Image (cartoon, rainbow, N blue to C red):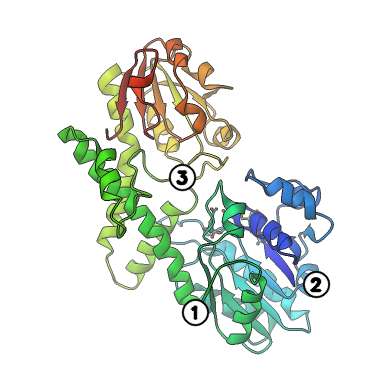
Amino acid sequence: MKVSIIGSGYVGSVSAACFAELGHEVICIDIDEEKVKQINAGTAPIWEEGLDELLGKYSQKTLIATSDYDYAVENTDASFICVGTPSGEDGSIDLSIVKAASASLGKAIAKKDRYHVVVVKSTVVPETTEKVVLPIVEEYSGKKAGKDFGIAMNPEFLREGKAVYDFMHPDKIVVGAIDERSSFVVSELYRKLDCEITRTNPRTAEMIKYVNNSFLATKISFANEVGNICKQLGINTYEVMDAVGTDFRIERQFLNCGAGFGGSCFPKDVKALIGKANQIGYAPDLLQSVVDVNNRQPLKMIELLQEKTGDLKNKRIAVLGLAFKNDTDDIRESRSIPVIDKLMQLGADIAAYDPMAEEGMKKLFHDVAYCKSASEALTEAEGCLIMTEWNEFRNLDKEFDLMANRVVIDGRHLINPEKLSTEIDYEGICW
Ligand code: NAD
């Protein structure tokens, strides 16, 4: 089949490369000319394992990029909207990018004389596909949904860091469509994947994505709350969760306590669901607590650091990890952001290191010394905060000897002080 992908970010570029791998002809559309150039040169616009290889394999063959909607729509059967859906000022969803993409798509569909399917892959709150995207495409195309063009919602569940693998080995595929014809076209695209397809209506598909992410975020905030209580009682929360997680109804994953969840999805998606619930007159207390616990968690690391080192003014503090999680260069909503912000307010000198995410963080914070290794960041530091679960931090040992004061606050349960050859003043955030 022939498919166009609108937006070449994390979801768009991975979907495009993977659809090409599944044997489809793909046209990527992005308004960012730099990304268009990168894809046409066969390089990935983001770092994601396996993505460069796939783009290199298909670019200029069955995968091309353009900023021309008309060309892409004319030459494909379906277009996937994969643009960002950030939080607005009050936390509720900001649909302006989706609306702009829908309008451009509508204008291109107006010029096409064959059936086309519009697929929303961006995470959007329930009712968006039918009440926002569909009317915009109808308005700009002058055509009728269900007759001249199809419309469907196909949420994406990939994890950053494992995105290519997750796309090719999904545990669920959800297609919510307004009619059988649209549903069939979208489902056909995934035919080669070994996964059952949940076929439903658009608003249910939209809700499945939010419930999925909100439940995982709830597990993390629950684990953090339990961890905070355990720490005060001198109980090892990891031992507790290891036992609790053996219950098949609960499952061990996402029960690790630490500095909280970040990333482009969990924080914004929980807030968007809260916003939607408020809009319909329901106060979602549990979801609000999930956000509150998550906001407090990273700042607890600073409190623990202050307890051990006192005033942080002019003290060199090593921040290890800037990405929101390991194996990605994405810093969106990273827990390092509120931590660096607070350290700056307290007048600390920050020496930061991340194997991949330095560039992104540089755009947010200029007054940070960005280091090329953990050793460099730790040298002469009077405290260290471990923020991201990078594998290379697990093996830190002698490097702590470089510190002026060997205080280590671990936000990710990476260091076992008993196994180190050197002595450190260690504190886990909830253990
Ligand atoms: P992103 O910001 O990385 O990428 C969006 C891309 O869209 C950018 O390249 C941008 O230049 C482009 N764009 C913006 N306006 C455009 C327009 N009018 N026409 C064409 N291109 C345009 O976003 P992302 O992380 O890929 O997320 C996209 C959507 O997928 C969001 O709704 C997000 O919640 C959802 N999602 C993300 C993930 C993830 O892990 N990142 C996982 C599942 C779902």
Q: Nearer the viewer, residue 428 or 237?
A: 237
**Callout 3, which amino acid?**
Glu
Task: Identify the mark nearer the N-term, 2 or 1.
Answer: 2
Which is more foreground, mark 2 or mark 1?
1
Pointer 1: what residue?
200
Q: Are marks 1 and 3 in contact (CB under 8 Å)?
A: no
Asked whether, in this view, residue 191 is left or right of residue 280, the answer is right
Tell me the SS state at disc 1: strand
Q: Nearer the viewer, residue 409 or 170?
A: 170
Tell me the residue at 38%/15% (across/down): 382
Q: In the rendering, which numbered label is found on residue 75?
A: 2
Image location (x, y in percent) of residue 192: 66, 68
Image location (x, y in percent) of residue 54: 73, 51
Locate residue 60: give its quadrant.
bottom right
Q: Are marks 3 and 2 in contact (CB under 8 Å)?
A: no
For disc 1, the neighbor class at 10 Å (few under 14, some 14 to 19, many from 20) is some
Tell me the SS state at disc 2: loop
**Callout 2, which amino acid?**
Asn
Tell me the residue at 70%/57% (across/down): 17
Q: In the rendering, which numbered label is found on residue 92?
A: none
**Callout 1, which amino acid?**
Thr
Q: Are marks 2 and 1 in contact (CB under 8 Å)?
A: no
Pointer 3: what residue?
333
For disc 3, the neighbor class at 10 Å (few under 14, some 14 to 19, many from 20) is some
Asked whether, in this view, residue 191 is left or right of residue 375, the answer is right
Locate residue 304: give its quadrant.
top left
Tell me the SS state at disc 3: loop
Tell me the residue at 44%/35% (across/down): 336
258 relative to 184, above or below: above
Mark 2 to mark 1 CA distance (whole Å): 28 Å
Which is more foreground, mark 3 or mark 2?
2
> Split into 4 quadrants, where in the image is the C terminus?
top left
